[in-house]
Amino acid sequence: MARKTATGLYSCLMPPVKKDSHMKPVHILSDLAQAAAEPKPARLAVLGYPVAHSASPRLHQPALDAFQIDAAYIRLEVTPGSLSEAFDLMRELGFIGCNITVPHKFEAMACCTEISPQAKQLGSVNTVVFSETGTFGYNTDGPGFVAAIEEAFAIQVSQAHTLILGAGGGAGQAIATQCCLQKPAKLTLVNRSLDKIEALAERLRILSPATEIRTLTLTDPELKHSCHEADLLVQTSSLGLKADDAKVIPDDCFLTRHCAYDTIYKPAETRFLGSARKAGCRTDNGLSLLLHQGALAFQHWFPGTDPLPYMRAAMQMNDQA
């Protein structure tokens, strides 16, 4: 069904995705029952606020179709504080599970009846499985990040000094924790304020005592020096989703030798990545993280499957469209 080409990309025969004219680009809780009753019923979703930008359906739907699973994957906009209500309704409507994105990754932990050990370590949930016995929470962001970095830059996270911008958020904390699980020599955490990342740093020092962990704010005079010391700069905050967002860090923080990664993938080049590219850095965006964490999430819903080739082919088709 799939083969790996010389360029490392996958090609595969994939049935065309049937577009249902009744399916909306974004759903809300009040129309979820209708989506679940469509000829191709909604059984999986990505939950966020906002969520219209999410590319998850473009990856998951081709995989569902390739495995002949009669289900639709939709975007579901859920306001903060309403996640428990959303889970109850989804369970009632026969949903298999869902992905969780900003700003619900912390709230999701409190809404699950059981959380995987890895999700507990990473401090957030991004993948949920509904079953007869409960609501199970997982985190695929961490391992997905490691796979994305190794693929994009051909470097081992364990061998890199990583500096994480926005480390106090859900994605930032998960990535910081995953970095520590790889036991690097150094890790730098940067956030608007120190309170969240100081507490995070204390937990990470217990997790990896040999890792030198530094914390600083975005306004710290040492920021430029700390960036220059790092090998991999990772931007995990929401800054960059809007064209008029402020720069995360000044342009002089970038060096040609840096690898720069932004967890945002729409726009494809944020101001952070634009500055990095102009400085001569190697860059990549969060689409590769979405791809790898999405494949791992799919395997939680459908154990024994390998959706990565189908998702990769779908991503390439979207890039060429």
Image (tube, helix red, strand yellow):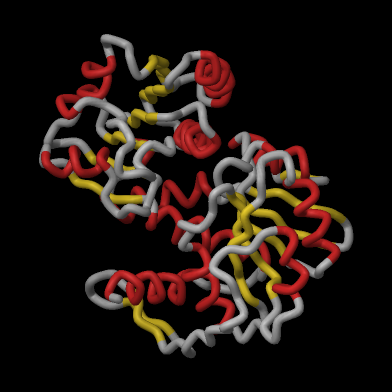
> Can residue 315 be seen from the camera position used here?
yes
- Horizontal side, residue 244 vs residue 109: left or right: left
Where 104 falls versus 150 (above or below)?
above
> Can residue 118 be seen from the camera position used here?
no
Q: Position of residue 142 (x, y in %)?
A: 51, 44
Image quadrant in which you'd find residue 81:
top right
In the picture, which quadrant includes the N terminus? bottom left
Report the front residue among 218 and 138: 218
Q: Residue furthest top?
A: 221
In the picture, which quadrant includes the C terminus? bottom left
Report the front residue among 108 and 306: 108
Where 149 falls versus 38 (above or below)?
above
Report the front residue among 178 and 132: 132
Q: Position of residue 224 (x, y in %)?
A: 22, 19
Q: Position of residue 160 (x, y in %)?
A: 31, 34
Q: Residue furthest right?
A: 133
- Horizontal side, residue 39 vs residue 51: left or right: right
Name the residue at 56% across, 51% down.
Answer: 140
Image label count: 0
Q: Position of residue 48 (x, y in %)?
A: 59, 50
Name the residue at 48% across, 14% down.
Answer: 194
- Horizontal side, residue 256 vs residue 143: left or right: left
Name the residue at 47% across, 16% down.
Answer: 193
Name the residue at 36% across, 44% down.
Answer: 242
